Amino acid sequence: VKEDSGTRYGFVFQGDDYEGGVVNGVEYIWSANGEIMRGNLSIIDPDRQIGLSAANIVVIESDQSVRGLGIERSMIEDGIAPEEVTGWREDESLDAFNDGDAVFLRGWPFMYQIFGQEGRVDQERVGIAPLPVAEEGLQSWSCLGGWNMHINAASRNKDAAWEFIKFATSPEIQKFRALEGSFLPTLSKLYEDPEILEAVPVIELGGDIVRNNARTRPVTPFYSRVSRRLARAFNSSLAGDISPEEAVSRLQEELENIVRRQT
């Protein structure tokens, strides 16, 4: 399609050395039937008397993970994605697609609402589909993410903060955000709202993906350290600085060391 239409890029995504690059990398691994971490580690917080359950077995070093990162690298090697994608985040990839310079974009639901407001591509020209997989028979996986609301334990305005959280997560505001920004709601009943489904087609597919095809990044209290290693290795592999085999081997050792030191 790129060659026939004269479009600059076949596929654009977020490959920079940051959390978005982690999301893209794990999706390539998952969609090749690989994993990052599994298992459960029980952690007791003596100050609050609660137990946490976290992944503690590192399983990223596998043929499947190598295949996934190899497919990601092949996007550049085969001329489907530009080399610049190694430094692209949401804005750069969205701009390329919205200006009509890319056939496909890996993006977040909020991007759908932007089409037609800026650039050359309007919503009627955009189709939405699950992420592809490495081969027929594998399951497509998308990385689940969102925004969390917390109240600082030292806050002097806990009641006011709680009132705002109730307001911001109410059905009315979640519907408003879906209609105005194509943000996926957290309330399942809104995925059946006729007004939302008519105005924002991405919501219907998004609901199916959240229910059936979404996974979280490793759930671990050490995630900030895990994420930093994943981001660096995924970006190096995508750029061709290291091979996918070297990337997953390095990550296996680094993530095991993180778990070992903290436990």
Image (cartoon, rainbow, N blue to C red):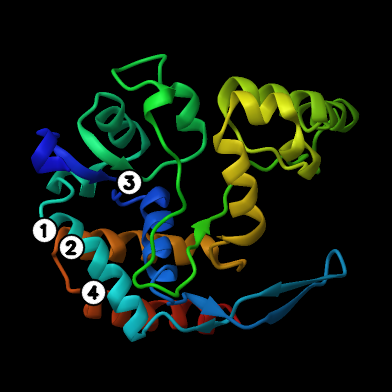
Q: Do residues under tags 2 and 1 come within 8 Å of each other at their CB atoms?
A: yes
Q: Earlier in the sequence, mark 2 or mark 4?
A: 2
Location of mark 2 (residue):
74
19 sits left or right of 236 in the view? right
Q: Residues within 10 Å of mark 3 (few under 14, many from 20)?
A: many
Which numbered disc, 2 or 4, marks the residue closer to the eye?
2
**Quarter containing the C terminus:** bottom right
Location of mark 4 (residue):
244
Q: Residue at x 13, y 48 (%)?
A: 83
Location of mark 1 (residue):
78
Label 3, label 1: how far apart the Cα atoms are: 17 Å
Give the quarter of the image for residue 53.
bottom right
Task: Report whether residue 19 is seen.
Answer: yes
Label 4, label 3: how far apart the Cα atoms are: 18 Å
Label 2, label 1: how far apart the Cα atoms are: 6 Å
63 sits left or right of 170 in the view? left
